Amino acid sequence: MAQKPSIPKGTRDFSPTEVAKRNYIIQTIKKHFEVYGFQPIETPSFENSETLMGKYGDEGDRLIFKILNSGDFISKVDDVTYSSKNSASLTPKISEKALRYDLTVPFARYVVMHQNEIDFPFKRYQIQPVWRADRPQKGRFREFYQCDADVVGAKSLLQEVEFVQLYDAVFTALGLKGTTIKINNRKVLSGIAEVIGAKHLLIDFTVALDKLDKIGEEGVKKEMLAKGISESAIDKASPLFAMSGSSMEQLEQLKSLLVESEIGMAGVAELYEITRNVEALGLQSAQLQLDVTLARGLNYYTGAIFEVSAPEDVKMGSIGGGGRYDDLTGIFGLKDISGVGISFGLDRIYLVLEELNLFPSSVSKSVDVLCVNFGERESMAALKLVNQMRAKGVKAEVYPTNTKMQKQMKYANSRNIPYVVLIGAQELEQGQFVVKDMAQGTQQTYSLGNPEEFTEHL
């Protein structure tokens, strides 16, 4: 009995139309990356495990796909480790490599390895797939593309301002108006942990806080208690859940809360400068919004952090995010290299554009012109015409077999081909071709000796 075909959960096949739509998003993002001065790089799909492990916190480490060593890897494991059935001790012995979890840590590794070839500040973009052993759900997959842009070697907050503008420019170009670019600062979160007496539990505090939009205020407080953060500390942090007003008004409230924390006040000052400059420059269609509960669970962020939300009427998780990391390359031996970067969530952006019907109709158009096949002599004339069209950049093809006209026209309709060319015996005799506009139902005749008369209108 034949095996029923299937694919792993959290992965997908993409049809030609879906690929065309994804490429439309990627090309839009890529165009703006390059307009803003970013250069492309690529890194391997898998890295040495030691490169990735320990960089994303405990939760992130659990989501990294490990790759089994080649050969008879079990025979190389000692009996004590094998019989212990302890995955933490067994995994390093049978797996030395892992699929990349994101593009930022591999980028940090790249910078360190190529530091003598790089001109700092180095602005790079990278569009490649990543893998996470996450629980599949709407908008969350185990294999997905990230579209990242980072700057390393510059501490100026103008970089953060430019990234806000970049988000705004891309989403405006995609027609996705009404996005919210949320901003916070890890220094502010460190300051809050300090003033409430939970400085030693900063990671637990931020990981729990980052889940506010998923599990609510009571859920966050319950998780904080479970992590050892005292009730009195949680009570001191409660003003975070009730902040309101404009970004500037919330920053004033933060000043009062953090007045005794030097690092917290430094974070407030950075947020004030970024917000003030963005407001002075203006945004096209997005809005910048301070969110003091935004934490982003990755350990390497040290300054500003970003997260982008789709328009309010779309139920979707974040469609982008990023932040400042002051010493990410330090984990690979290159100290004091500050960086900041953002990422676009391609798959979630796709779902949002699809839901809001924002893809241009031209995106799904695979071919501009189809030439009907009337027979051997006619199809050779059609091929010559197609070659001339292709030389002008027109996407064109000849139907491969001489079959019923109805079948060929149905094929053109199903592929959303806007123009059908007819070269029958009569047209061939007269040195002409007929173009049928499939949308309008009209026809027009052109000379085979002057196809530019038709193609210049495409």
Image (cartoon, rainbow, N blue to C red):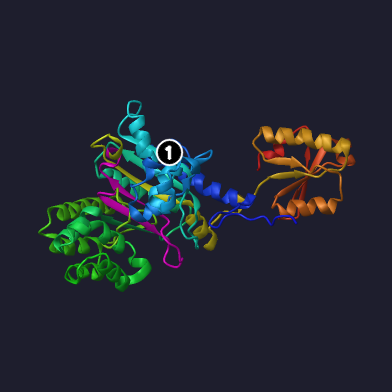
Q: Residue at x 54, y 48 (%)?
A: 24
Apparent side of residue 325 relative to residue 41 in the rendered image (left or right): left
Q: Is residue 390 above or below residue 198?
A: above
Q: Residue furthest top?
A: 116
Amino acid type indicated by mark 1:
Glu
Q: Which residue is mark 1?
A: 34
Dividing the picture into quadrants, the one containing residue 149 is top left
Of residues 213 and 353, the one nearer the viewer is 213
Q: Residue furthest front?
A: 79
Question: What is the span of residues highlighted in magenta in the rendered image?
Answer: 301-330
Dividing the picture into quadrants, the one containing residue 48 is top left
Please tell me whether mark 1 sits on a helix, a strand or a loop.
helix
Please rate how many residues cluster around mark 1, counting C-alpha atoms within 10 Å: few if below 14, some from 14 to 19, many from 20: some
Q: Is residue 302 visible?
A: yes
Give the number of marks: 1
Quadrant where the C terminus lies? top right
Task: Tell me, yes or no, whether the highlighted magenta stretch contains residue 237.
Answer: no
Q: State the image coordinates of residue 51 (x, y, percent, origin top left).
A: 37, 40
Q: Is residue 454 above or below residue 86?
A: above
Apparent side of residue 425 relative to residue 193 in the rendered image (left or right): right
Q: Is residue 18 above or below residue 196?
A: above
Apparent side of residue 154 relative to residue 45 in the rendered image (left or right): left
Q: Is residue 32 visible?
A: no
